Image (cartoon, grey):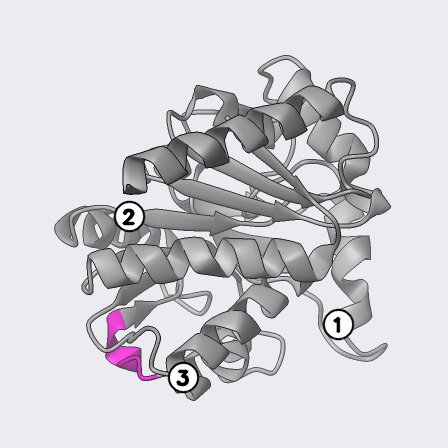
Amino acid sequence: MKVVILKDAAAVAAYGAEIFVKQINKKNHSVLGLATGSTPVALYQELIAANKESKVSFSAVRSFNLDEYMGIEGDHPQSYRHFMNEELFNHVDIDKSNTQVPPGNAANPIEACEKYERDIVDMGGIDIQLLGIGRNAHIGFNEPSSSLASRTRVKTLTQATIDDNARFFGADEHQPHLSITMGIGTILESKKVVLLATGEGKAEAIQATVEGPLSAACPASALQMHRNAVLIIDEAAASKLVDKEFYKHIEVENQKLEEMLEL
């Protein structure tokens, strides 16, 4: 697990976006795993800017989103399909027919989950998966106690996650308590994983993910088993790491190595 500690949220977004730009320019038909939430928005803004400046094209890209609320339509303003359209897809040259979001309104959600897994396999797997992290270290909607081998499935949200997301819903608006989410096992099959975290509110989750034991109680700790996982965090999110200075030293040495390999 590579831990990159940067000054602030803007630097985190720029660093993460550059990874995605390099991936797409290396393989124009890359399969991206995408995420919603407040943290990825700045990264998406960086990608939109890069697209408008002709630094990257999404015309051949395919994507799969991590999760979606159950029981709401894709055009609902709080759906994750709507979020992705508004925050990224509407602003870049991507074919929306090549973008997949779990169908929260599926008549048979169990079958829909199985099909989502098959569709990912049929596309050759996910080349690079973007993740945020919850205060309880959930990734996607894989809440604590989720199996580390779990697949795309229907998941009940914890009260903590419901409370964290309540700010997006009006007082008289239905807030779903169920979701469809990629499983941890599904995420671990991605060829590369990029997790973003900013702010002191994520510090405990990051410390548990990086330095704690591998445990279903900390879903993101499963990334310790991934051979190509990158955690990009700001100083605030890194504030509880015991070996913070060591991770910074490793990144400096990694940058030197990359420069040598580019010569």
Q: Is residue 223 above or below residue 7?
A: above
Q: Nearer the viewer, mark 3 or mark 1?
A: 3
The residue located at (76%, 74%) in the rendering is 169
- Helix, strand or loop at label 1? It is helix
- Mark 3: which amino acid? Glu
- Can residue 165 be seen in this snapshot? yes
- Residue sitting farthest toward the front: 263
The residue beneath circle 3 is: 53
Q: Earlier in the sequence, mark 2 or mark 1?
A: 2
Q: Earlier in the sequence, mark 3 or mark 2?
A: 3
Residue sitting nearer the eye, 49 or 229: 49
Where in the figure is residue 201, as x and y percent of width and height?
83, 45
Please give left or right for residue 78 compared with residue 32 in the image. Answer: right
- Helix, strand or loop at label 2? It is loop
- Can residue 217 be seen in this snapshot? no
The residue beneath circle 1 is: 168
Extent of the magenta region? 93-98
Pointers 3 and 2 in contact (C-beta within 8 Å): no
Q: Nearer the viewer, mark 3 or mark 2?
A: 3
CA distance for labels 3 and 1: 32 Å
